[in-house]
Image: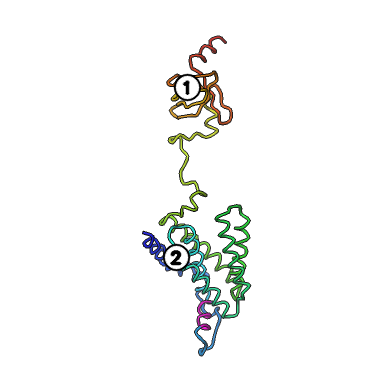
Amino acid sequence: MNRWKESISAFYLLALLGTIGSLVVPFGYAAAESSAKVPDNSSFAEQLGEFVTNPYVVMLLLIFGLAGVFIELLTPGFGVAGGIGLISFGLYFFGNYIAGFAGYETLLFIVIGLLLMGIELVVPGGIFGILGFISFAAGVVYATYDTTVGLISLLLAMVIGGVIVAGAVKILGIRDTWRRFVLFSSQKNETGYVSQKERAQLTGRQGKTITPLRPSGTAEIDGVRQDVVSDGGFIASGEPVVVVGVEGMRVIVRKLLEEKEIQSDK
């Protein structure tokens, strides 16, 4: 099953990238003249650098890299998506390095940025995520021959990559590691959840005890189970009660008969 999910993840990533060309052309990224030029007798590495620094390819590599790494982090399985992401970032840096646009300090910025954003996923708070994004963005932008091309490529890659990651999470689910950070179940009245505002409006409502109150227990008020506290000692189960007050999370009840006697005395 894990192998199947990994294959689906890789196929999904590659299939969506096939539609990106129509989004790239209006921005003028298909112009190969903007990339690094090398002589015809150049080495394979130099030819690879020329190809990778094509603005069209730059954005594709960034989308592959961002989507692959985050799909690997967020969804079950291991290897395929993460491998695609790391290879893409490696080609991105290598091509710009061979072309003379990037240095090792650029790689350092990218690596530090990815590490800090990874820490943010485990230790939420904001500061690691902000610093990581700034470091990563600086490395990506300054690795290109033109910072404008780098910036626009990064922004487009983030948007398209975000759509790909969201779709992958929808299809493959999310790792159990992250489930504790996300509320997947909704709190509804049908399941017994009562908000603080609704609880404050219970005063005067009637119901019946489900368990004995000594002095705390459970009662059904307007068809919803509530944790309640008796206002006057023990109340047996099955007794009609009325809510006489709400103090924070405490719902205070009294026997209905006693409450009627008190009201009649007034």
Q: Nearer the viewer, residue 34 or 174?
A: 174
Q: Quadrant of residue 250?
A: top right
Q: Quadrant of residue 155?
A: bottom right
Q: Which mark is residue 94?
A: none
Q: Secondary structure at mark 1?
A: strand
Q: In the rendered structure, which segment of residues is drawn in magenta?
A: 45-52
Q: Is residue 167 visible?
A: no
**Tag 2: amino acid:** Gly
| Residue 68 pos. (x, y %) | 48, 64
Q: Nearer the viewer, residue 62 or 104?
A: 104
Q: Secondary structure at mark 2?
A: loop
**Tag 1: amino acid:** Gln
| Residue 59 pos. (x, y %) | 52, 70
Q: Which mark is residue 206?
A: 1
Magenta segment: does it hold 117? no
User: Can you say which quadrant of the picture contains the N terminus?
Assistant: bottom left
Circle 2/circle 1 CB separation < 8 Å: no
Q: Residues within 10 Å of mark 1 (few under 14, many from 20)?
A: many
| Residue 149 pos. (x, y %) | 58, 71
Q: Nearer the viewer, residue 96 or 35?
A: 96
